[in-house]
């Protein structure tokens, strides 16, 4: 199934209502902020928090492993884009069926239709387990990985 890439919307809203009653900056104040800064702000709004990404990455490697900052940022951008891509496809399905809520099955459908059926199969099982046991409870056990030293032979 061919899928056209759509303009992705930010994960977080660009403008939130401030409960303190502080008004947004006036055009004179906005002149102090460059277009590059505005673009960077909006770009960062699309990404998952780096601390959450780093925590998930750390859980997948041995405790002694280090993860470079640029690796964390790269994964942050990739997973955020992946989530937006899948969610956009699921939202299209909901829109076509005149529904307002995206459910787990919509995400699985989107993953399969976009060519991620290997992930969709594993997540189908995970979704069933979540529904069977509820979403609360202790986190899954940490998986330990052992990395052997790399021996480069030239």
Image (cartoon, rainbow, N blue to C red):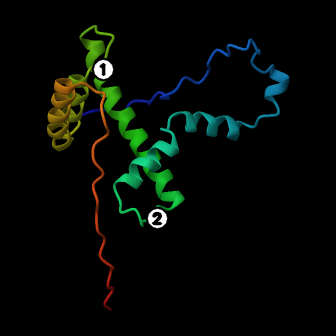
Q: Residue at x 76, y 15 (%)?
A: 23
Q: Residue at x 85, y 24 (%)?
A: 28
x and y percentages locating residue 37 in the rendered image: 69, 39
Furthest residue in direction front, as rendered = 138
Q: Nearer the viewer, mark 1 or mark 2?
A: 2
Is the C-beta separation of discs 1 and 2 under 8 Å? no
**Label 1: few (<14), some (14–19) or many (≥20) C-alpha neighbours in 10 Å:** some
x and y percentages locating residue 80 in the rendered image: 43, 39
Picture quarter containing residue 91? top left
Q: Quadrant of the N terminus?
A: top left
Q: Is residue 1 visible?
A: no
Q: Gap between marks 1 and 2, in whole Å?
A: 40 Å
Q: Residue at x 35, y 34 (%)?
A: 85
For mark 2, give the secondary structure. Answer: loop
Give 66 or 139, whichever is nearer the viewer.
139
Instruction: Give residue 92's mark.
Output: 1
* Residue to which mark 2 is pinned: 66
x and y percentages locating residue 67 in the rendered image: 46, 61
Give 103 or 59, whichever is nearer the viewer.
59
Picture quarter containing residue 114? top left
Give 92 or 63, whichever is nearer the viewer.
63
Q: Is residue 146 left or right of residue 63?
A: left
| Mark 1 / mark 2, whichever is N-terminal | 2
Q: Residue at x 41, y 39 (%)?
A: 81
Q: Is residue 52 left or right of residue 93?
A: right
x and y percentages locating residue 138 in the rendered image: 31, 36
Q: Is residue 133 left or right of residue 87?
A: left
């Amino acid at each position: 199934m061919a899928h056209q890439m759509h303009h992705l919307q930010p994960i977080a809203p660009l403008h939130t209502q401030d409960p303190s009653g502080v008004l947004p900056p006036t055009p004179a104040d906005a002149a102090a902020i460059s277009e590059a800064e505005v673009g960077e702000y909006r770009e960062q709004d699309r990404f998952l928090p780096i601390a959450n990404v780093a925590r998930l990455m750390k859980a997948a490697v041995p405790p002694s492993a280090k993860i470079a900052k640029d690796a964390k940022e790269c994964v942050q951008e990739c997973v955020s884009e992946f989530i937006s891509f899948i969610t956009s496809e699921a939202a299209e399905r909901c829109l076509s069926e005149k529904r307002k809520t995206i459910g787990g099955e919509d995400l699985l459908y989107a993953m399969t239709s976009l060519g991620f059926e290997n992930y969709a199969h594993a997540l189908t099982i995970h979704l069933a387990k979540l529904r069977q046991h509820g979403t609360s409870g202790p986190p899954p056990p940490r998986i330990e990985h052992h990395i052997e030293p790399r021996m480069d032979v030239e």
